[in-house]
Amino acid sequence: MQRRACVLAILATGTMAGPASAYTAYVSNEKDNTMTVVDTATMQVVKTVDVGQRPRGITISHDGKFIYLCASDDNTIQIIDTATLQVVGTLPSGDDPELFVLSPDGKTLYVANENDNLVTAIDVDSKEVKTEIPVGVEPEGMAVSPDGKTMVNTSETTSMAHFIDTGSHDVTDNVLVDTRPRFAAFKPDGSQVWVSAEVGGTVSVIDNAKRQVVKKIKFAIPGLRAETIQPVGIAISADGKKAYVALGPANHVAVINTETYEVEKYILVGQRVWHLDFTPDQKTLITTNGNSNDITFIDTATDEPVQSVTVGQQPWGVAISPN
Amino acid sequence: MTSAVPGTLALLCFLSLAAGALGASAQQPTSQSAGAIKPEDKITEIKIGYLRAYAPRLTLSLLDAPPRDEGVAGANVAIGDNNTTGRFIKQKFSLDVTEIKPDADAVQAFDDLIAKGDRYVVADLSARQLLSIADIARDKGVLIFNVGATDDSLREEDCRINVFHIAPTRSMLADALAQYLMVKKWPNWVLLYGSHEQDHLYAEALRRAATRFGGQIVAEKEFKDTGTARRTDTGATQIQQQISVFTQDLPEHDVLLVADESEVFGTYVPYRTWTSRLVAGTAGLVASSWHPASEQWGGIQMQSRFLKATGRRMLSKDMSAWTAVRAVGEATTRTNGDDPKKISDYIRSDDFSVAAFKGQKLTFRKWNLQLRQPILLGDTKSVVSTSPQEGFLHQVSELDTLGIDQPETKCVLK
């Protein structure tokens, strides 16, 4: 049944470069308390699962067995078994968890607690809080360096990227960026951290050794008011050559050459594009479009949108299975 | 498309922007934001004064009775926010609140505040009181942040180089409303206004907005304050008849505009009119700088934080005071200092902006130091719309389609 659907889908979308590998994408839908499960090869919704209230941040364990999902209004993180799609446990996230990041060794989840100005480190195995780290006002963006030694949190009203030593849990550096920083992403080689500023309308590139902003990237889309360009999610390709930035209500994703810092293309996706992620083979990028209630598949070879798929109400984040 | 400013300026720049804006530019960051901030030993204390004219007052609806800490509560939440940020850069903020009567002399209270060492003063005062301290403040190097007075005159003929205006003006509020009514294609208005000075000022702002955006005021009527219209045990029946009769025999119109800042009759207009018309202005659909139900653009976070801290919902004056204290915090963070002269220079520079949960950065108009801001249009329950409306264009910022614009300004900063 599923295979037949797959063949049909590929026939129907002849613009695809070739058959993509089959992964599973999990999309959190903020407004209807569900998670949509999508087959990335057929680009079809496989299942919709009821989850906790106001699901936002979503990630997947490195072995692909568990999904971690912030149920913000339930003040908890749900653990969902990807085999059964059942909630099998919770993690003590603290108040109003929004975004988190899993350490490279898969053992620690770092969570931004927006209402309490804290980052909480949770031991995934014991399900216990290891420590709480005071940060700036409205912490949101979270990233961990590839070597696992440095964690970065951005705080929206403070407008800083806080660099935290994951060994001592001390805040070692605070780097000012533009207004309302929402998301942080390390380059795969760990040399830089990219931070988006939603209201500032920029992406700051921070040198991880110097802990200084070395470049500020601005955006301009012909015919759109500057205020509508509000950078949020960032995804950097595994080879480190391209960065994709979701521009929120501008309804476009910017494609940036990471060597020249030039925007090479603006890809039109759905309304209020929020977060995005690559499939493990790097051939496809999936964006969540909050106001049009869909996700968009982008072919990274051509940087063209391939197809949009309707999911739940106000899709927020996406996590894709590693295999 | 509708042009907000007279003449050719508005559209031209939009077109040239669109044509020239291909691609993005990568720029070197400014020096303020380039370096990592390392903790230093010395803590800088930044004392902010809050001077407030206050007396309990009657409102037509119990729901509109101002909370005892209106405004002050917003400033306190912002002090907390500034201190959370200040922890990383060794800055500590505090708030001194002083209250005077609405008709009292403000000079002594102001002198007392600056004797305590306050160099930034949030002012919730009448225009008259604010003017009485503005020049003294300037001579002593003190910056004032106006959160209470909506008078256009304070940003025009009476503007001062050391007075920043966070509260929107009456003309900004009226323009925000007028844009929406024009977008809805409800262009014919009847204007009902109260008999007090501030009612006349808001009525004048509405007349100006009509001229500016193409609305027609087909009739006007003043509601005299005879001192008898206020809430009483038996008032409901009388008011029902009184408003009905007052709105009889009006020419055909789409919307009844009400200008009653003095709380004499406005709240009683909706649903009691002779014909079934919508009401807007100080009653019905109301323009304001904040709304207790605004949750867009991260607003839900601000609302939750405020509710948790104060036990009540956040009002416009709370948001203005929050923004005032945050503007000082933002400037001291970015300049890593607390010298009022440097702070003033920075706030007036192109580098300054402050985020206040309105979907875009807020900056000051350099020619009169008024904060540019989207205006929310709401009823008692929800936000109906946000102005500027789509299609009202401007060569500098769409936000400048609200209120008196630079080409018309009478302000000479001194």
Image: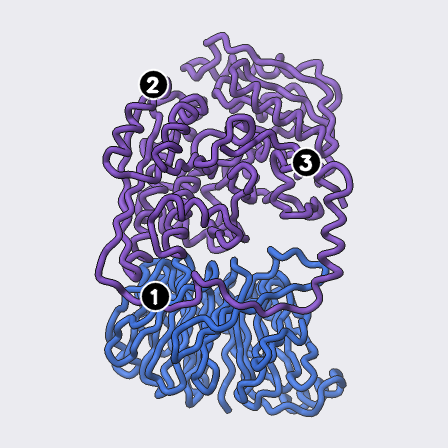
Chain colours: A blue, B purple
Point out the frontmost of discs 3 and 2.
Answer: 2
The secondary element bearing badge 3 is classed as helix
Amino acid on which the number 2 mark rests in the picture: Ala
* C-alpha gap between disc 3 and disc 2: 39 Å
Q: Are marks 1 and 3 on the same chain?
A: yes
Residue A77 vs B142, above or below: the answer is below
Point out the frontmost of discs 1 and 3.
Answer: 1
For the residues labelled 2 and 1, say whether their Cβ atoms are less than 8 Å apart.
no
The secondary element bearing badge 1 is classed as strand
Specify the label residue A289 is tagged with: none
Q: Which residue is at a point 73% across and 30% down the rendered structure image?
A: B215
Q: Nearer the viewer, residue B46 or B342?
A: B342
Residue B304 drawn at (x, y percent): 38, 51
Residue B308 vs B316, above or below: the answer is below
Work out which quarter of the rendered image holds the N terminus of chain A and state it: bottom right
Give the mark count. Answer: 3
Q: Are marks 3 and 2 on the same chain?
A: yes
Amino acid on which the number 3 mark rests in the picture: Leu
For the residues labelled 3 and 2, say whether their Cβ atoms are less than 8 Å apart.
no
Q: Is residue A140 left or right of residue B272?
A: left
Q: Which residue is at a point 57% across and 26% down the rendered structure image?
A: B270
Q: Are marks 2 and 1 on the same chain?
A: yes
Specify the label residue B104 is tagged with: 2
| Image mark 2: chain | B
Task: Say which residue label 1 marks.
Answer: B37
Closer to the N terminus: mark 1 or mark 3? 1
Examine the rendering and report whether any part of residue A71 can be seen: no
Amino acid on which the number 1 mark rests in the picture: Ile
Residue B380 drawn at (x, y percent): 50, 36
Q: Nearer the viewer, residue A305 or B350?
A: B350
Specify the label residue B181 is tagged with: 3
